[in-house]
Image (cartoon, helix red, strand yellow):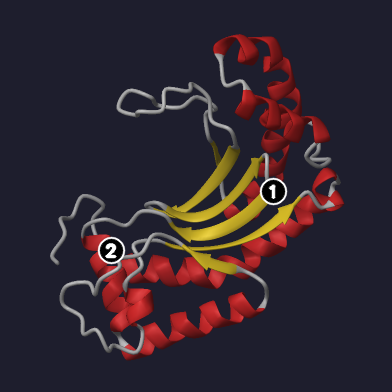
Amino acid sequence: MSSFTGFPVAALDFYDDLEMDNTKSFWEAHKAVYDESVRQPFIALTAALEPEFGKAKIFRPYRDVRFAKDKTPYKTHQGAFVAAGPAMGWYVELSPRGVRVGGGFYEASGARLAAIRDAIADDRTGRTLRRTLTTLEKAGYELGGDRLKTTPRGYDADHPRIELLRHKQVILGRSYGFEKVIHTPAMLTIIRDDWRALRPLVTWLQRAVAGVPEDARDRR
């Protein structure tokens, strides 16, 4: 297996063009570019990270359009995800906007979301999370994720961590855009360091949902 040498400029050009011409004919004419400049670098990158973080899922390039209004057949980005639990872990993405690295949870419906909110509301564990997020935000990571506009049921609107309790997702990320480093082997070290920095968040989430069955129903 070849070593990770960075994301080629051709990968960004490929997604720029795919956004303009998201058709089967374009894909088939440029599939070799995808394989060489997108997929192979992701395989090499995730293989290098696997000993420390675990095996990654490299997402398929095809969209599921069965129930979507948008019938364009191909994703205009490439992502890889290492799971540390149901719908939580570490992420890296390449798109026409460059490279982005992140971690957290992107879906925690049912009892898992209730368990996370209970841990946020708890004075001990909730303050630990708030300190972790503050430290990471000061280091340059951005807090994102879908949030409720209203107060979740069962919690007071004046709770000291009500903004966190409104989150249906908690995702911390950092964008590297088109910085020259994304085209070099040094990007591997940067991604590894980012994932290490995000480990306290991922570990907190793992502990919050520990013991909750994946198919448990919502209790709120």
Judge whether residue 176 can be spotted in this image.
Answer: yes
| Residue 169 horizontal/vertical position (percent) | 39, 61
Toward the front, the furthest residue is 20
Q: Which residue is mark 1?
A: 99
Q: Nearer the viewer, residue 42 or 63?
A: 63
From the viewer's perspective, is residue 58 above or below residue 144?
Answer: above
Mark 2 element type: helix
Judge whether residue 1 can be spotted in this image.
Answer: no
| Residue 20 horizontal/vertical position (percent) | 63, 25
Q: Residue at x 55, y 27 (%)?
A: 61
| Residue 94 horizontal/vertical position (percent) | 66, 42
Q: Quadrant of the N terminus?
A: top right
Q: Which residue is mark 2?
A: 113
Closer to the chain start, of discs 2 and 1, is: 1
- Using the numbered discs, state the Cα–Cα distance from disc 2 to disc 1 in whole angstroms: 29 Å
The local crowd at label 2, few if under 14, some if 14 to 19, many if 20 or more residues have their Cα within 10 Å, is many
